[in-house]
Amino acid sequence: MSIRRRTLAAVILPVVAAGMVGLTTALPAQAGPEHAASTQAQDDLRDQLEAVPGLTVVSEEPAPAPGFRFFFLTFRQAVDHRNPQGPTFEQRLQLLHRDTARPMILHTTGYNMPEYAFRSEPTALVDGNQISVEQRFFSPSRPNPADWSKLDIWQAATDHHKIVQALKPIYAAKWISTGASKGGMTSVYHRRFYPRDVDGVVAYVAPNDANNAQDKAYDDFFASVGSTPACRTALENLQKEALTRRTNLVNLYDQFAAEHNLSFDRVFGSTDKAFEMTVLDTEWAFWQYSSEADCGSVPPRTATDQEIFDFIENVAGFEFYADDAILFYSPYYYQAATQLGWPQPKFAHLKGLLHYPKLYVANSSLPPQLRAKHDPWPMSDVDRWVSRDSSQMLFVYGADDPWGAEQFHSSDKDSYTYTAPGANHGANIAKLNPADKAAATATVLRWAGVSAAPAAKRSAAVSTLDQRDPRNIRRPL
């Protein structure tokens, strides 16, 4: 099971770019009465935030665009919400403030919190405010000591419930939650346990492994993705060739690890094992991040060792299974192992070439002390609730995204599922066909209580906020 990255740099750099916003709004040279009133309103907002029990205003950053304010916050959460008087931890979140009268978008990351200002697609559609929340147990939003048994979908959903309860007195307009991939899953789980917290959910490319023991959907996907079999065959041949040349390519991997100061002691134990996992990832990572138009970049079987190595490094990333990168994502793999499930294609075309049976499971990417037994009930419960009882749920998938092989199926209660043709794991409403795009946009606006989309004309600074949406950056799940 992999979160599929290109490189370790791509994992870390977008996350730690706290100082990259850089777009500030200068105050007028001569401040008149209107400016004084605006300043008073800004002071009132900060006062209101600081008065919320458990909420800490860590900092207010320079305005990322005219008409916005940007805060880094923490919120005190119970480690175990069933024992609210017990130990606590500080959960990080960011607030992009537009206007308390505008809708609020609750952006559930599912992972760590981006440290820069951005607008998710629903935030841009409704011209609203946005809270982006770091998932519990992603550092530094991790209890110390960490009781990993308290990392489950109900505890995380309750984190979000507490944040909604705390901020609704300030932001009293409509609320919509959103997230992509594991963030989309997280927004679904929050809706499952607290269905009255928000007025709608927009979940992008959210996998739904309702029955972890049945993963035929992934084999069916790889047997049919794309318009012709040529690309599928080229990727399978590339994987075969890489494993056939294992000795030579692992030698290149050893050199690569030495050059990049990578270690494999705490999880995989060797470059050979990490190599096999990365090769298994290659076909998946290609379709997750690329498109059929990129099929010509797949090296032929006659390619050199270095050409094959470089392609796999570019597509799947040899740094990802080194200790530093994979341990960063331990909270994800722990949740996958214990509740979420994981995709496990059969890799029939690689029969006889694999050295590590049953490697492609979530526990393989965890240190031994965190490996745990899977509980199938939570995903079965969520799947049943979504398909029968949920309402105001909008799902968007990409036709060529392997994570969409197992989808949520919405109910008929003001809920919808759309698929973007030819899109990968970056699918969104903008990539739908025109009729679906119009319908999905109208639904989001209606749920948000907004009569029409904001005017198309935007400043360069606001456009930058939208471009910096993590959905537009090559990121994991």
Image (tube, rainbow, N blue to C red):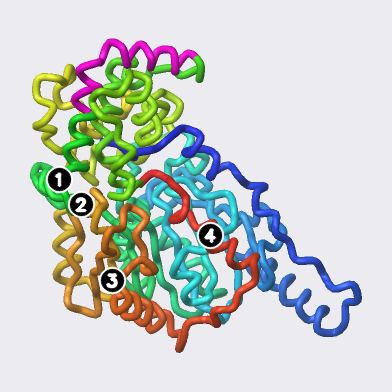
Q: Secondary structure at mark 4?
A: helix
Q: CA distance from mark 3 to mark 2?
A: 28 Å
Disc 4 crowd, CA 10 A, few/some/many (<14, 14-19, 20+): some
Q: How far from the left and from the top, in percent, is residue 219?
A: 12, 43
Disc 1 crowd, CA 10 A, few/some/many (<14, 14-19, 20+): few
Front: mark 4 or 1: 1
Q: How far from the left and from the top, in percent, is residue 326?
A: 39, 30
Q: Amino acid at mark 3?
A: Met
Question: Which residue sits furthest front?
Answer: 302
Observer-nearest of 268 and 466: 466
Q: CA distance from mark 1 to mark 3?
A: 35 Å
Observer-nearest of 183 and 91: 183
Tell me the number on the disc at residue 463.
none
Q: How far from the left and from the top, in percent, is residue 401?
A: 26, 52
Label 1 close to label 2 by CB (< 8 Å): yes
Tell me the number on the disc at residue 467.
4
* Up/down of 210 relative to 349, above or below: below
Q: Secondary structure at mark 3?
A: strand
Residue appearing at x 43%, y 46% in the figure: 474
* Up/down of 440 relative to 288, above or below: below
Residue 468, visible in the rendered structure: yes
